[in-house]
Amino acid sequence: MPDARPLVVRDARFREHIAPRSHPERPERLVAVDHALEALGDTVRRLEPREATDEELLAVHDRRYLEAIAGCAGKTRQLDPDTYCSPLSVQTARLAAGSLCEAALRVARGDAKRAFAALRPPGHHAEQTAPMGFCLFNNVAIAARALRSEAGVERIAIVDWDVHHGNGTQHTFETDRDVLFASLHQFPFYPGTGALDEQGHDHGLGATVNLPLPAGCGDAEYGLLFDSVLEPILLAFKPEFILVSAGFDAHERDPLGGMRVTTAGFGLFAKRLRAIADETCGGRIALALEGGYDLDALADSVGEVVRVLADPSPRGGEFPETSPRGMEIARDLRAAHARFWPSLAERVQA
């Protein structure tokens, strides 16, 4: 019988991307995450990291950009107001992208049903030709392209629950009907993208699903969107694989975000997506660490999410009842996306 335990990528080398003093995206984040994952013992299986190949990186990023980033190896540089390179950052970023590719490919090929990759630097802000927002390579976008080219997966859903909008991922796939990008994020907020009317272009129109939320939303508001907007869209899309940009900076204790999601709330996010994966794509789901800057909140939340992935039969767990404000937000978002997703139209009238 195949080993049902989820794959987990973790390695001390991800700490070798060294932040300037006081930078929130710092190696200590993964020290905290490693402690949480270590506590899970043999309920998970460890997957050794590997570097991304040039072909995997070039499936998303421009060659001139890769050459420019390669030129930073062995140096310390500020790449934009928020993003930096230290001497081992290029190698670490290639390791992050390649490790997520490997985890996703192992799941796609049946070696496991689920995976979690504890990576840094994060990736969802990285554009085709530019670093941005702490990110050098777009890990999730690179893994999605690898799934298509190396494993023959055609329909991929990417769910991004980081508090910041995944601009780089959206821009990579906004003309692609077979890659659904769905993002729940604080808005208006960094990086300024992710407005409700950003719904894709050309053949990809409708496959970009932005769910912008005002500051102060928590488990109840997020939960209503998971259950009444995201779930029906994913069920209608029928993905063959689900990738998740799992940021934990919407946590109520996070210093950069303005949201109120709890540790238990992140566990419910994982339960909902695991159940959808079980129903639509044989359980095939892989999550990649993005943001999350309060060390205790990050460790607790990652531990909760991976416990959900490892549980042989997770049961129960309901989101809190939402407020009239939350109902209004959900109604507006359902209405905005209903023309592309008819299953939402009935809910608008509810």
Image (cartoon, rainbow, N blue to C red):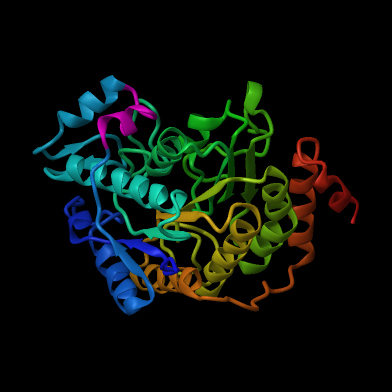
Figure quadrant of the C terminus: bottom right
**Left or right of residue 46, residue 254 in this image:** right
Q: Position of residue 342 (x, y in %)?
A: 82, 41
Q: Which residues are magenta?
A: 53-62
The structure residue drawn at horizontal position 43% and vertical position 32%, both measured from the top left corner, is: 149
Say left or right for 169 vs 16: right
| Numbered-mark total | 0
Q: Position of residue 154 (x, y in %)?
A: 55, 36
**Nearest to the observer: residue 32 or residue 77:** 32
Looking at the picture, does residue 22 appear above or below residue 320?
above
Would residue 14 be counted in the magenta stretch? no
- 279 over 54 or under it: above or below: below
179 vs 289, nearest the viewer: 179
**Residue furthest out toward the front:** 1
State the residue lying farthest toward the right.
349
**Residue under the image location 63 percent in, 47 percent down:** 212
For the point 22% across and 60% down, which residue is it? Answer: 11
- For the point 71% across and 47% down, the residue is 233
**Residue toward you, 121 or 80:** 121
User: Which of the 4 image quadrants contains residue 325?
Assistant: bottom right
Residue at the extreme left: 74
Q: Quadrant of the N terminus?
A: bottom left
Q: Is residue 58 magenta?
A: yes
Is residue 187 at least partly visible in the picture? Answer: no
Residue 199, horizontal then vertical, whole percent? 65, 33
Residue 323 in the figure: left or right of residue 110: right
